[in-house]
Amino acid sequence: MKIIKFKPDIRLVQLIIALSLFGLAASIWPDLKPFWLMSVMALFLFSLFDLWLVYRTPPPVIKRTLSSSLSVGVMKEIKLSIKNHDKKNIVVDVFDHFPEHAEVKGLPRRLLLDENEVAQLTYYLKPLKRGLLKLVQTECLVTSAFSLWRYKHLLPVVDQVRVYPNYAPVIEYALLATENHLSMMGILKHRRRGQGMEFHQLREFRDGDSIRQIDWKASSRMHKMIAREYQDERDQQIIVMMDCGHRMLAQDGDLSHFDYSLNALLLLAYVALRQGDSVGVSTFSHEDQRWVKPVKGVANINALLNGIFDLQPGSAAPDYSSGARDLILRQRKRSLVLILTNLRDDDCDDLKSAVHLLKKYHKVVVASLQEQAVIDRLESPVVNLQDALTVASTHAYQAKRDLLVKQLRNNGINTLDVLPQDLALSLTNTYLDLKASGQI
């Protein structure tokens, strides 16, 4: 449905002000009154005529062109095509209505369109929240023929696009994903020549090979030393357990801890899928619990993304035991389970119980996100009593949290305790270390 709203343009306001001043003069000099009345009538009729022309002016036709997907926090180009169907030139101000959780650069824009002219307008949109982003209408302010009125068209131009986590680090990894360049991103891949979990091939014995690699039967047949070469075991399964509780709402910079976790998951998944392993996701501490079955192959990373791109943390407290029980029912095959969370000292009993349960079936790693605000407070200077009390309480909080991390490590649980921006690389390196050591 077309909605039109009118408002006077600046020229009409200026004419009304001029007539008001003319009327003031006519009140002082009565001889001017007839001319003032004629001027008022003329402006009234002329403005009505200009307003009548509005109804004969068709609205411009607008089409929007945008990418099939967007990334949170990344500016993306959006194009608008505006066509003038009127038989005269028009001046139009265009503004594309965007959701609350987005930023726009390059709007509004003013265009002068000739008869039947099609103009292209480009602006940039940055989503600030994952999920479905809906663009439902575009607003056009068109100046009337004699520039006395401006009329607004709210045109239904509906588009819906998915906003995914920021996958720029994955693209960067793809460009550098050779063994000579992995270290440029901080991803350490340990090479173990000729050693691994699965038999790969037979080859001639080389200097530096272990005697245990020698295949004596093959060496006897070939009359030269033959060694077995192994490769890392493939087709293993990686399950990421994501805490969707209220703590993951904590903000560090532009992103929440949950968004940092999603970015880390994305990089880890890309690396693991390239290694021939499968990656799945299980969420807990949320009403909308998700289970994305493990997928294999880099081409299937979109299936993983589509299962979690709109997931948002809720207000519930973390429930590790419930998440562990659900995962055991869903995932029977032994896997590497990575728990992404934000630990507190009051999690001790529940987390230990959940980890103990998971250890019976899977290899478990706990990755906890530190809060930059806590680190900054510990490093801030103490200048008064209030600062001293705040820093002392922060030290007590941090000591309890560090104790929980230490207890997990003493129980043989691989535990990461890192800042959000370091999570992606730490998690990926931990996966590669465990795979290289044959622990998964």
Image (cartoon, rainbow, N blue to C red):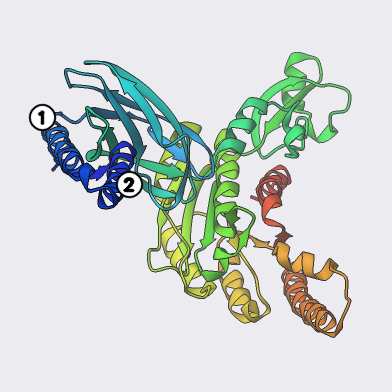
| Tag 2 secondary structure | helix
Q: Position of residue 128 (x, y in %)?
A: 49, 49
Q: Is residue 213 left or right of residue 356?
A: right
Q: Position of residue 71 (x, y in %)?
A: 49, 40
Query: What residue is drawn where x is 60% and y is 52%?
Result: 254
Residue 84 tag number: none
Q: Bin the neighbour count of mark 1 within 10 Å (Cα to Cα): few under 14, some 14-19, many 20 and up.
A: few
Q: Is residue 161 left or right of residue 52?
A: right
Q: Amino acid at mark 2?
A: Leu
For marks 2 and 1 on the same chain, the one whose residue lies earlier in the sequence:
2
Q: Position of residue 45 (x, y in %)?
A: 12, 37
Q: Is residue 256 left or right of residue 29?
A: right
| Tag 1 secondary structure | loop
Q: CA separation, marks 2 and 1?
A: 33 Å
Between 343 and 39, the one lying in front of the other is 39
User: Taking 384 as reference, is 318 above or below it?
Assistant: above
Q: Amino acid at mark 1?
A: Arg
> Quadrant of residue 147 in the image?
top left
Q: Position of residue 168 (x, y in %)?
A: 58, 36
**Residue for badge 1:** 56
User: Taking 16 as reference, is 213 above or below it?
Assistant: above
> Quadrant of residue 64 in the image?
top left
Between 293 and 223, the one lying in front of the other is 293
**Residue for badge 2:** 21
Query: What residue is drawn where x is 51% and y is 75%?
Result: 317
User: Taking 355 as reference, is 109 above or below it?
Assistant: above
Query: What residue is drawn where x is 41% and y is 56%?
Result: 291
